[in-house]
Image (cartoon, rainbow, N blue to C red):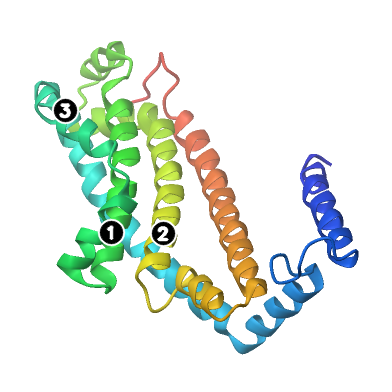
Amino acid sequence: MKKLKGLILPAILIIIWTIISNLHIVNEYIIPSPQKVFLAALEMIKSGELAKNMIISLERVIIGFIITFTISFSLAVLIGAKPKAIPYVEPFMEFMRHVPPIATIPILILWFGIGEASKLFVIFLATFFPIFSNTLNGVTNYDKKLLEVGDSFGFTNKDKFFKIIFPQALPSIMTGIQLGLGYSWRALMGAELIAASSGIGYMIVDAEQLSRPDIVIVGILSIGIFGYAIDYILMKVTYRLVNKYGKEIDYGRVDS
């Protein structure tokens, strides 16, 4: 029932959209009818154009995210293990965090052209800081008393990390991953809108140049629906992981 409530607002918007289109209140070139958008989506699904561009964009996000996560997570854990290093990197990280990834696209195009490298770098800039900062926060803010309990069990540093620190840091890490995925998806769309020859962003720009607002709307809806699906799946994974590791540590007890 709760999930059905979330469909009420979209349904109302579609009804209003249909009424506006049928009454010709707004020029159809500006806002095409839902029927026209649906037919355009159906045509693109049948031709495979929508799937092709979506897969290309998804591949970019996955590759860029994996590279970024590997670097940012490792760096956060490394710095978290050496707290004295934080004052040396914090000013630079804060500076870069306030630079919008989209603002770097012109210089990235000059450096790498409009190929995959510039798009992956944009994803890296958008994804790095949410993952890094949340991971660093998670691995530095834990119950220090549990380390003493770990010492009494003869835990090695590896055991302490995976059995004490990591389970407590997991919610923060997953929050960073969730934010990072959202940022990477939005940053990629911005990059594809500016410089790309494939992908959903390119499809939207190409449709705009061909005066096909129906395809533009199909692209926008596809981005929203696909982004929501990714976020939903990630939330389910997060819930299961937190529950799983939550059983291994009870914020006052460490199992041997």
Q: Quadrant of residue 77?
A: top left
Image quarter of the N terminus: top right
Q: Quadrant of residue 142?
A: top left
Q: Which mark is residue 91?
A: 3
Would you say residue 69 is visible in this rendering? no
The kind of residue tagged 3 is Pro
User: Going 23% across and 66% down the picture, which residue do you hit?
Assistant: 109
- Closer to the observer: label 3 or label 1? 1
**Label 1 environment density (alpha carbons within 10 Å; few <14, some 14–19, many ≥20):** many
Tag 2 near tag 1, CB within 8 Å? yes
Q: Which mark is residue 190?
A: 2
The answer to whether residue 148 is left or right of residue 173 is left
The image shows residue 26 at horizontal and vertical percentages of 78, 62
User: Going 44% across and 34% down the picture, which residue do you hit?
Assistant: 245
What's the distance in space between the residues labelled 3 and 2, CA to CA? 27 Å
Tag 3 near tag 1, CB within 8 Å? no
User: Going 30% across and 56% down the picture, which residue do you hit?
Assistant: 122
User: Going 25% across and 65% down the picture, which residue do you hit?
Assistant: 118
